[in-house]
Image (cartoon, rainbow, N blue to C red):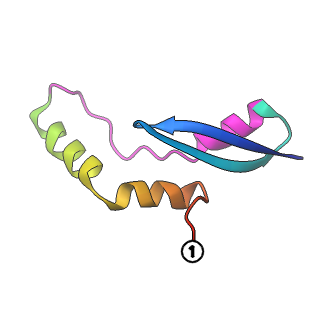
Amino acid sequence: MKDFEISFELFGKKMRTTISATNESNAKKIILDKIIFHKIVVKNDNNSDDYLNDFMGNDETFKNLMDIFGMNKK
């Protein structure tokens, strides 16, 4: 296992974390596997706008993402 420093961007926010993995491809897969999709709806659906606005407008969302990727300073 090697430590890889991964820099990535999510919704315009640049982030960086360190992952232990066997190779670069495995490190990318580890990051992708940490993403949890809660709901996917058709954009034309009027109900989807309210859900997405609530999710993206939540101040805790970015903090939670930082927790997931181990970047929150405690």
The span shown in magenta is 25-44
Along the horizontal axis of the image, is 51 left or right of 5? Answer: left
Question: Label 1 is placed on what type of residue?
Answer: Lys
The single residue placed furthest to the bottom in the displayed view is: 74
In depth, the one of 62 and 55 nearer the eye is 62
Q: Secondary structure at mark 1?
A: loop
Residue lying at 48% horizontally and 54% vertically, measured from the top left: 65
Look at 40% across and 37% down and name the residue there. 11
25 on left or right of 62? right
Which residue corresponds to mark 1?
A: 74
Query: x, y percentage for residue 5?
Result: 73, 44
The reply to whether the magenta stretch includes residue 4 is no
Q: Nearer the viewer, residue 34 or 3?
A: 3
Residue found 67% across the figure and 36% down from its top: 29
Quadrant of residue 62 within the rendered picture = bottom left
Q: Position of residue 38 (x, y in %)?
A: 37, 47
Q: Is residue 50 left or right of residue 15?
A: left
In reply to whether residue 34 is colored magenta, the answer given is: yes
